[in-house]
Amino acid sequence: MTKILILGGGGMIGQKLARRILDHNIFPGADLTLFDRAFPQGGVPAKKITGNVSDPAMVQHLAAHRPDVIFHLAAIVSGQAEADFDLGWDINMMATWHLLSALKTEHEASGGTYRPRLVFTSSIAVFGGPYPDKIGDDFLAAPQTSYGAQKVVCETMVSDFSRKGFVDGISLRLPTICVRPGKPNAAASGFFSGIIREPLNGQEAILPVPETVRHWPASPRSAARFLTHAAKLDTALLQGRRALNMPGLSCTVADQIEALRRVAGQKAVDLIKPVPDPAIMAIVENWPQDFAPDRAIALGFEAEKTFDEIIAVYMEDDLPG
């Protein structure tokens, strides 16, 4: 029996991941535990533990159960990490340090036999400009936001703890995940989902940036697939380079809107209201726009090829009714 722990298991991606593990029998006979501050009503039926990932004692308690696979999704989002500097470092960086330290303690207590697979959700925010036309696998990680800085520090810790044999870790640099279901969150990228999700639900959506803004999205379904694929990957194939740029597609906000028009017509597009927000633009303009994720693709990671596909995933998986 494989013991699986999802940190951040109450969040949108955590719930998608848990559902995929159970519905697709990814780990036969899995003993699945979800950890988060709160859980959605009617969520995935699995063991749930409520607590704060920034509490070292709680993290030590979770590690003491010696899960075989740990998905570390717990974090505060980009906009909040930028607005609250101290909180961002406490939740996004220090919590990861406490987790890795607790797992090291369990490894040593086991005589070196306990070495869990740790899948860490990083972000393309680890990169900063100036950018090439396409970011390749050898491009420098030099973030220009606090959120990106926190993620790249965690990637380095995951690599070093793995090098020492305490864990078997891999960091996935996720694209912008959209179209996200549910209510808007504090992520600077939230509008990428909102300008599709809200109109499809007959609601007004705010667009805080110009339509020329280009980004690198993938669907929540792809995110869950990335995570389960990483959990089973032979990490020897990484050759010590344990952070991977995930696949996605490069598109502009205008491309998104045209895809929405094709699906739902001009009436839906008319619900998008431009309201410029300099703070969001200052964050988003430093994000990468296009990638050549050759390593990840060669290792079997896959994502959508068009934004029409991403909208179709939202409509199939999450559109009410």
Image (cartoon, grey):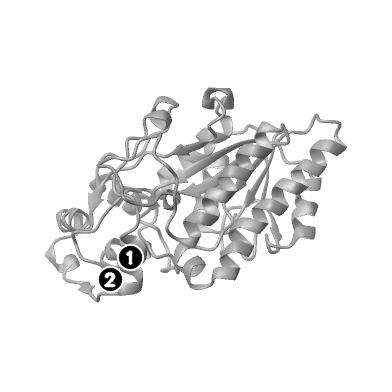
Horizontal and vertical percent for residue 172?
Answer: 49, 42
Could you say which is closer to the camera, residue 47 or residue 208?
208
174 or 97: nearer the eye? Answer: 97
SS category of the residue bearing label 1: helix
Measuring from the top left, give residue 208's x and y in whole percent.
Answer: 28, 71
Q: Position of residue 207 (x, y in %)?
A: 26, 69
Where residue 191 is drawn, which disc sits there? 1
Q: Quadrant of the N terminus?
A: top right
Foreground residue among 60 and 262: 60
Image side of residue 55 versus residue 28, left or right: right
N-terminal label among 1 and 2: 1
Q: Are marks 1 and 2 in contact (CB under 8 Å)?
A: yes
Residue 228's tag is: none
Which residue in the structure is indicated by mark 2?
A: 208
Where residue 222 sits, quadrant-wise, is top left
The correct choice, above or below, for 293 with respect to 94 in the image is above
Task: Work out whether 132 lies above or below 49.
Answer: above
